[in-house]
Image (spheres, rainbow, N blue to C red):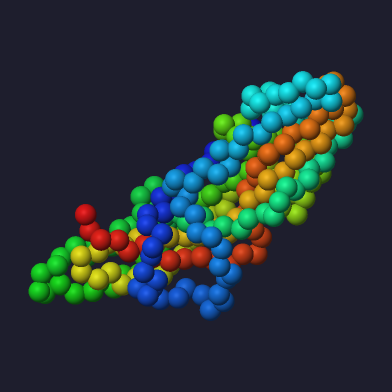
Amino acid sequence: MNLTRLGVVAGTLTTALAFAVPAASAIPPEYTNVDGATDNWVNEAKPTAEYKNGIKETDPARIKEILDQCKGQSVSCKATTVGTPQKVTKWFEAAQDGNNAKVVENCRTDGGAKDVDHTVGGMHAFAWGWNVGASVDIPLAKGVGIGINGQYNETNTDTKTESTKIVVPPGYRGTLQIGYDMERTVSDINIQGGKFGGAKISGVRTEALLKNSGDRVRPDIVKCG
């Protein structure tokens, strides 16, 4: 099953947070902000594989074939995390009609221009999964230990609806953004059995939604034009 990695329009990441009314009393932890519209961390992975007999593979499709063996009963697979997983917040532009975000425009700059208050709502559906690079997803069996908490989910979809009041000053326009806290992991996978007696795949990147992470909502306020 191929997973669709939805691109997200995050706009500028230098948001004037003072323009927002807080949406929740609990303050979630701060992670590195990521512009999902341009982020391609998972797909930029360039994993390599080496069979026990010394044959090496770099073609993502071949690596996927090696990894597919983990679904068989006669093959044992185990993933080992390389380095420290990174936590990031990926920002999505909230949509009101499934596609387009609600834009609050206040582009007047004449003497009579005033701040515009508007309560903006929206939602964003987000699918995620594992990947070995070059958009080749991993239909991997559970139990390999790859990714967050040693769990594998072939696909997940999450939809949030949020509403917050934003204040747009003259000469600016604003949209609502929804953030998702993600954990990024790099793993090596050791395969015992199967073709040529086994293999090792190095540099597999995974990205998973952090469970129980706080809701993230913020305005994106940018200059008109």
Would you identify the image quadrant in which residue 56 lies?
Answer: top right
| Residue occupying the far bottom of the picture | 25
User: Residue shown at 65%/45% (left/top)?
Assistant: 206
Residue 224 percent coordinates (x, y): 23, 58
In this view of the protein, can residue 96 be seen by the observer?
no
Would you identify the image quadrant in which residue 31 lies?
Answer: bottom right
131 vs 105, left or right, is right
User: Residue shown at 67%/49% (left/top)?
Assistant: 185
Q: Nearer the viewer, residue 147 or 196?
A: 196
Which quarter of the figure is the C terminus placed in? bottom left
5 vs 16, left or right, is right
Q: Nearer the viewer, residue 136 or 124?
A: 136
| Residue occupying the far front of the picture | 54
124 vs 67, left or right, is left
Q: Nearer the viewer, residue 78 or 5?
A: 78
Q: Is residue 214 above or below residue 73?
A: below
Q: Is residue 93 above or below residue 21?
A: above
Residue 3 percent coordinates (x, y): 59, 37
Q: Nearer the viewer, residue 24 or 138?
A: 138
Residue 189 percent coordinates (x, y): 77, 38
User: Residue shown at 76%/27% (left/top)?
Assistant: 50
User: Residue shown at 41%/54% (left/top)?
Assistant: 10
In this view of the protein, can residue 168 be seen by the observer?
yes
Residue 168 percent coordinates (x, y): 28, 69
Which quarter of the figure is the N terminus placed in? top right
